[in-house]
Image (tube, rainbow, N blue to C red):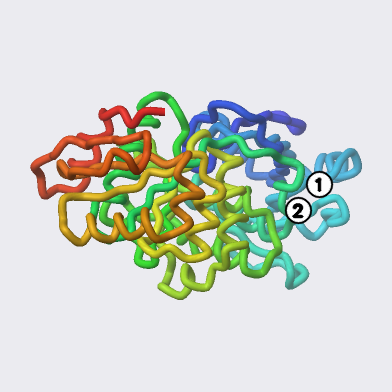
Amino acid sequence: MTDKKTVCILLNLTNCKRKAGAEVKLQLLIATDDCDYADHLSNTLAGDHADAIEVSVCSSLENLHEHLDAREFDVALLEATMIESADMQSIHLPLLLWSEEGNIPNIPGEIKKIRKYQRISTMVSSILELYAGETASECDSCTKRAQITAVWSPVGGAGKTTTALAYSAGKASEGKQVMYLNLEPFSSVSAYFSETGKSVSSVFEMLEIGKGNIKMLIRSIRLQDNASEITYFCRPDNFDDMNILTSENIAALIDACSEVTDELVIDMSSVCDERTRKVFEHADRILLVTDTTHTAQIKFSQFASQHNTFQRIKSKAALVANKGAMVNESLVDDIICLPLVQSTDTVAVYKTLSSFKFGN
């Protein structure tokens, strides 16, 4: 390993392939005299990830001073032997690369630690989550990139989540990067995906305080289902985390998510309140789901005939008739009749329906 080494790494927080759009490069400095570890870390990042980050590596105090004199860094991972001599004016977020061995050096209390020997993908996620909390949002200068599809029903149990996931999986099979965003008050994510990552509550908290880089945080905590290639978030820590979101919070969340994926599919609650209307406003397409039950038929009829929201969204709505439901074809021009899948395995049902064409 040479003392001066700059490697441009495509870093993806969830092992997802980017299809389009450039990401802002995070300038990361690794400062350690452990050459074997530095090589392993940089090589693993270069081989396993795919988002834009530029990494510089130095292995001596002399090289560290040269790097910090020459440029500024967004994040620096500093070994204990390096941190006391580093010029912090050139580092936005310094982190102590801590091996949990020996004494902790005498460093300012505001400098956070990050564990050296851990899964590198977990380390990357933690680094960008920390950086997201320290920086301003990038969204002001960005424009929406994703196609946004909202999936809603006035009644629970009509197949809304199954429809949302089938649509998501179908788009992913076409080569799109798809993000599934569950906004139900009681999330059903764990019934379909593994939840081994960080809760989406950290995103909600950043939205509430109105400070931080939402896009970067989203990229750092989203997960990907290997089978379907859908990206998603772990459920909130508790009910209140979702319940306190305002319609403005919802709008900010949608905007941020839509800038880091090709397709954003929003699985909504069955109420029709201000937050629901905000989602409808942002959506390019709305899938309205109903089934064969008398309750679903009555509630959907009431929504279509008595609620002015329906008239506002009618032009971009498609009516999804699930489980062989009969629908009033005069309500909307776009009617989607899903085939009946005989299975009690909810995952198998949505994967079977993923091959169904939902139209435009």
Give the alpha-carbon distance from disc 1 to disc 2, as whole Å.
6 Å
Regarding mark 1 in the picture, which secondary structure is present there?
Answer: helix
Taking 200 as reference, is 165 left or right?
left
Image quadrant in which the C terminus is located: top left
* Contact between labelled residues 2 and 1, with CB atoms less than 8 Å apart: yes
Could you say which disc has been placed on residue 82 in the image? 2
Residue sitting at the far left: 342
Q: Is residue 10 above or below residue 180?
A: above
Q: Given the image, on which type of amino acid does mark 2 rest? A: Met
Name the residue located 18 percent from the left edge and 44 percent from the top edge.
325
Residue sitting at the far right: 69
Name the residue that disc number 1 marks: 61
Pick the front one: 307 or 260: 307
Residue sitting at the far bottom: 240
Q: Earlier in the sequence, mark 1 or mark 2?
A: 1
Q: Position of residue 145 (x, y in %)?
A: 60, 35
